[in-house]
Image (cartoon, rainbow, N blue to C red):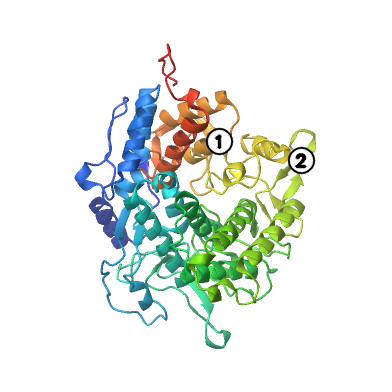
């Protein structure tokens, strides 16, 4: 078994510290059997327990036709709760104060009057806005019946509110200001200071400051999903409103055309010798004209965009801005009337909806373009555009992606433009990051290079498919490419699944769990035993 990790950018001391911290967490064991095993940590070592989730796992897995697939579901769905809840402090439990930084606003984050949850991404002891949202999404359906789980999820909403207020451009955060050495501490990233003079933007709470539009959308999505699953208005207070207003104003500033001096004040460079995906050209990225779309400096892979308008992230923004508007309206009674107005005097809900409509119109105008290699020159969604007429045709496994547009709720899976786009994405002659080999086939990412397939893309292919045969094929690939670890990985070699990256990647585990949950609700005949039939699916 060859495990590829992306440690090359970390100083040696940080590598050692990270490994020790990872071992201290309940990291998944590494079995080596072709028959699936229960590899969840012992109960006493699990970082959080939900009786409702465990009950659902036993119910669903117990009815599944294929034993390996059922076992894989048992391991993956609870993995986030089992291993990545780094900290959970219910309201009223005192939190360590530590020493306050000179950075304004940091001390107020030590409040103990709200539930607080910090969830790491897996083998990196930091919390990503995007990852943490996706890690907990499958649990939302169980929150009403499990108050303890609901409290955990509410704490995550509260934590993300604080993170947005700490720095709206940061994509990943440390648990507190005393975390210690950060491998990204020396990134050159600035914000406007007094008199407009750029000042260092890094502070001890920030793990990484890569501005990603989808991270802001993930924050909005977490709130909407929590409210949809619980009808609890508790976390949607004035602090949440301020965070949403900050997201809105940031998106507005990132709609502007790229000028010689970036209007947003955002600047990021890692090092002159870094890989292209790790830094921005001249610190601000490729120029973009005004289109109505919102710029994103980085993709959900944490790689830099080539063209400034990332289409899947803008599609996600349309959906989540509208959903946030609904949450704002429906939770208004829980807030003071003065909170209901944005700085401009208009209802925040209206402001969110207006921006969503602008982005939606711009997507249809700027992002739907003919593809020269598509049959009959069909129009497809481009992956990135710049407003000057340049387009990038590809897709990346990380969500939001073009493949995931129906999953995001932006468009139906039967939409003709989506179907043309899907054919382009799932074809190695039209998507440079679609790979086929003896181990499997699927979309990869520039983040991991040529010939490496991401299980996340196979899961998303199944989640957005209308074909039983295609879904069954995806399930077979997912169950046979775990390299006997019985967890999802970041990527694997198209010809050898035993050569994989990131054995502890919580987001992918949760997404697989969500796939099985969806199938149990929408296509139960694909995974459950039926009368007189008990044949393996795989």
How far across and down, in percent of the image, does residue 167 sit? 48, 71
How far across and down, in percent of the image, does residue 448 sit? 48, 46
Question: From what the image shows, is residue 149 above or below residue 78?
Answer: below
- Going from the N terminus, do you reach mark 2 or mark 1 first? 2
Task: Name the foreground residue: 528 vs 210.
Answer: 528
Determine which of the numbered discs, if any, sits on residue 372 in the image. Answer: 2
Q: Residue at x 41, y 18 (%)?
A: 536
SS state under label 2? loop
Tell me the residue that label 1 is attached to: 461
Q: Residue at x 50, y 63 (%)?
A: 210
Q: Quadrant of residue 105?
A: bottom left
Task: Name the foreground residue: 83 vs 304.
Answer: 83
Q: Residue at x 76, y 56 (%)?
A: 389
Mark 2 residue crowding within 10 angstroms, few (<14) / some (14–19) / many (20+): few
Q: Residue furthest right?
A: 376
Q: Residue furthest bottom?
A: 195
Left or right of 33, for residue 103: right
Mark 2 or 1: in front is 1
How far across and down, in percent of the image, does residue 294 sit? 65, 62
Q: Residue at x 64, y 47 (%)?
A: 410
Q: Are marks 2 and 1 in contact (CB under 8 Å)?
A: no
Residue 117 visible, this orientation: yes
Number of numbered markers: 2
């Amino acid at each position: 078994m060859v495990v590829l990790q992306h440690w090359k950018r970390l100083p040696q001391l940080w590598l050692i510290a990270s490994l020790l911290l990872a071992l201290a967490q309940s990291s998944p064991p590494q079995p080596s059997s072709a028959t699936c095993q229960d590899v969840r940590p012992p109960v006493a070592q699990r970082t959080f327990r939900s009786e409702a989730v465990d009950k659902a796992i036993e119910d669903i897995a117990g009815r599944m036709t294929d034993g390996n697939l059922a076992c894989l579901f048992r391991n993956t769905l609870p993995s986030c709760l089992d291993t990545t809840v780094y900290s959970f402090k219910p309201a009223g439990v005192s939190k360590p104060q530590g020493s306050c930084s000179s950075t304004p606003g940091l001390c107020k984050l030590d409040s103990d009057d709200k539930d607080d949850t910090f969830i790491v991404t897996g083998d990196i002891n930091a919390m990503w806005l995007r990852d943490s949202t996706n890690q907990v999404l499958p649990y939302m359906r169980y929150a009403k019946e499990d108050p303890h789980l609901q409290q955990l999820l509410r704490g995550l909403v509260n934590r993300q509110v604080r993170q947005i207020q700490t720095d709206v451009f940061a994509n990943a955060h440390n648990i507190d200001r005393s975390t210690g050495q950060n491998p990204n501490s020396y990134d050159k990233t600035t914000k406007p200071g007094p008199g407009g003079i750029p000042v260092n933007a890094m502070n001890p709470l920030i793990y990484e400051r890569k501005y990603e539009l989808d991270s802001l959308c993930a924050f909005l999505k977490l709130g909407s999903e929590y409210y949809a699953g619980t009808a609890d208005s508790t976390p949607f207070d004035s602090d949440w409103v301020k965070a949403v207003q900050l997201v809105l104003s940031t998106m507005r500033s990132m709609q502007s055309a790229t000028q010689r001096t970036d209007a947003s004040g955002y600047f990021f460079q890692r090092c002159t010798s870094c890989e292209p995906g790790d830094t921005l050209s001249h610190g601000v990225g490729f120029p973009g004209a005004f289109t109505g779309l919102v710029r994103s400096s980085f993709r959900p892979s944490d790689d830099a965009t080539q063209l400034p308008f990332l289409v899947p992230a803008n599609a996600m923004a349309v959906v989540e801005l509208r959903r946030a508007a609904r949450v704002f309206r429906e939770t208004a009674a829980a807030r003071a009337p003065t909170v209901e107005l944005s700085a401009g005097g208009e209802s925040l809900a209206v402001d969110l909806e207006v921006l969503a409509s602008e982005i939606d119109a711009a997507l249809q105008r700027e992002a739907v373009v003919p593809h020269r290699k598509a049959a009959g020159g069909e129009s497809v969604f481009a992956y990135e555009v710049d407003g000057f007429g340049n387009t990038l045709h590809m897709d990346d496994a990380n969500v939001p992606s073009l493949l995931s547009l129906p999953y995001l709720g932006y468009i139906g899976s039967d939409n003709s433009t989506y179907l043309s786009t899907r054919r382009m994405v799932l074809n190695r002659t039209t998507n440079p990051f679609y790979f086929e080999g003896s181990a499997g086939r699927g979309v990869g990412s520039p983040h991991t290079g040529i010939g490496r397939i991401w299980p996340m893309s196979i899961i998303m292919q199944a989640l957005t498919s209308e074909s039983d045969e295609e879904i069954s094929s995806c399930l077979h690939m997912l169950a046979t490419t775990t390299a006997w670890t019985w967890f999802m990985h970041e990527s694997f070699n198209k010809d050898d699944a035993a050569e994989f990256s990131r054995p502890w990647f919580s987001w992918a585990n949760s997404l697989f769990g969500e796939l099985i949950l969806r199938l149990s609700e929408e296509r139960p005949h694909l995974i459950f035993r039926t009368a007189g039939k008990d044949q393996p699916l795989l």
